[in-house]
Image: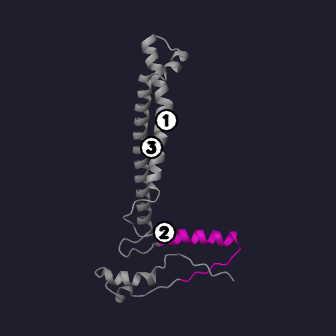
Amino acid sequence: MLNAPSSAPHPGLVQTLFRHMCAGAAIGYAVLHPASVIIYDKLRLGFISLASSIGSAFDLDHIWMAVYFAFIGGAFGLIHGINHHRKAVLYAKVKRLSITDALTGLYNRRFLTECLTREWHRTKRYNGELSLIMIDIDHFKNYGPITQNKAYLNRHRESLDRGQCARRPAAR
């Protein structure tokens, strides 16, 4: 179900960014550093010698290159994590906008169709029963100035939207 937007950071954001940063640092150290050592030795010796490259990988100069590439990889991992989080937040916002009415904030027909489909499949899977009650309110605008009075709408929203599209009966 959808919850009201929160100003608090996304739960697990720090852990997700940390994982992306560590993965980037590991890739920087495990891939970029050995490649740089091989390229450095190729330029210095004129040919590629894996034996001398492996031996020189732990020289002081190469250790600093390893730290540098791990840092660069971590920075790229952090940037990737931030972009991943931004995409997830935008997707959630677009999803919320696509299933709610802009004026009332109530769920729309698309959400009803999704819920009915989900509940229908659940009913078939568990050999249960499904009941649906729909109420049509004629002359709805006479019940309050919907377009002008947000307080009225917020007061009556709870009676129109209980947060679930279908309620399952309690266990018998």
- Dominant secondary structure of the residues highlighted in magenta in the image: helix
In the rendered structure, find residue 21 and report the number of the disc placed on it: 3
What's under tag 2, amino acid-wise? Arg
- Write the residue at 48% across / 25% down: 35
Badge 1 is on which residue?
27
Give the mark, 1 or 3, whose residue is nearer the N terminus.
Answer: 3
Residue sitting nearer the eye, 51 or 161:
51
- Measured Cα–Cα span from mark 1 to mark 2: 43 Å
Task: Give the residue drawn at x 67%, y 78%.
Answer: 129
Type of amino acid at the residue the image marks with label 1? Ile
Label annotation for residue 110 = 2
Q: For the view shown, which residue lies furthest in the right direction?
A: 127
Residue at (46%, 79%) from the top-left corner?
161
Mark sitting earlier along the chain (1/2): 1
Number of other residues with Cα within 10 Å of mark 3, as a class: few under 14, some 14 to 19, many 20 or more: many
Mark 1 residue crowding within 10 angstroms, few (<14) / some (14–19) / many (20+) = some
Query: What's the residue type where badge 3 is placed?
Result: Met
Secondary structure of the residue carrying tag 1 is helix
Give the structural element (helix, strand or loop) at label 3: helix
Residue occupying image coordinates x 51% and y 31%:
30
Residue 172 image point, x, y percent: 69, 83
Q: What range is drawn magenta here?
A: 109-133
- The answer to which of 102 and 157 lies nearer the viewer is 157
Q: Mark 2, residues whose alpha carbon is within 10 Å: few (<14), some, or many (≥20)?
A: few
The vertical placement of 144 against 27, above or below, is below
Which residue extends farthest top?
A: 46
Please count the marks in the image.
3
Residue reaching furthest to the front:
60
**Percent from the top left, x then y, of residue 67?**
42, 32
Which badge, 2 or 3, is on the more N-terminal residue? 3
**Residue 45 rendering spot, x and y as whole percentages:** 45, 11
